[in-house]
Amino acid sequence: MGGKCRSAGYAWLALNGVLYALAPRLALKMSSKMLTMGFENADELEPREWYQDATRATGVGMIATGLAGLAFERGGEDSQGDAEADEAETAA
């Protein structure tokens, strides 16, 4: 159960990373909507260019982390199955 939740979390991270890397302005707009709901005139805020670049870099990092996590999860499942097969052969 924990492995499936972890895998889903890694996939979600990678998908968010794609959004942040390909459309940083949209990602910033969506996240700022949530953060500034209690303020007036929050729609008039404009992110600076460097902040958009930092958001894009964060997205690339999120993609790499999510895909690496998924790869490690998949590799862990394969090695667990191999270990169980080895134990079964040893016991027989």
Image (spheres, helix red, strand yellow):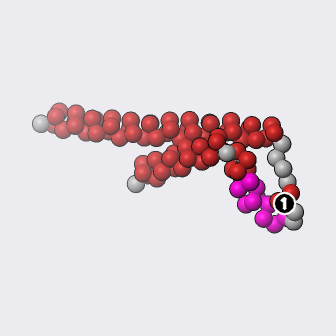
Q: Residue at x 51, y 45 (%)?
A: 10
47 sits to left or right of 8:
right
* The residue stretch that appears in magenta: 29-39
Q: How many marks?
A: 1
72 sits to left or right of 34:
left
74 sits to left or right of 47:
left
Q: Name the dominant secondary structure of the magenta segment.
A: helix
Could you say where residue 55 lies in the image, as x and y percent from the top left? Answer: 71, 41
Asked if the magenta segment contains residue 23, the reply would be no
Can you see residue 6?
A: no
Q: Is residue 3 above or below residue 42?
A: above
The residue to which callout 1 is attached is: 42
Could you say where residue 11 lies in the image, as x and y percent from the top left? Answer: 50, 47
Asked if the magenta segment contains residue 37, the reply would be yes
Can you see residue 42?
A: yes
Q: Residue at x 82, y 59 (%)?
A: 43
Q: Is residue 74 above or below residue 35?
A: above
Could you say where residue 85 lies in the image, as x and y percent from the top left? Answer: 22, 37
Count residues near mark 1 (Cα–Cα under 10 Å), then give few for <14, some for 14-19, many for 20+.
Answer: few
Q: Quadrant of residue 31?
A: bottom right
29 sits to left or right of 65:
right
Q: Quadrant of residue 35?
A: bottom right
User: In which quadrant is the C terminus drawn?
Assistant: top left
Q: Secondary structure at mark 1?
A: helix
Q: Amino acid at mark 1?
A: Ala
Q: Residue at x 53, y 41 (%)?
A: 66
User: In which quadrant is the N terminus drawn?
Assistant: bottom left
Q: Residue at x 85, y 54 (%)?
A: 45
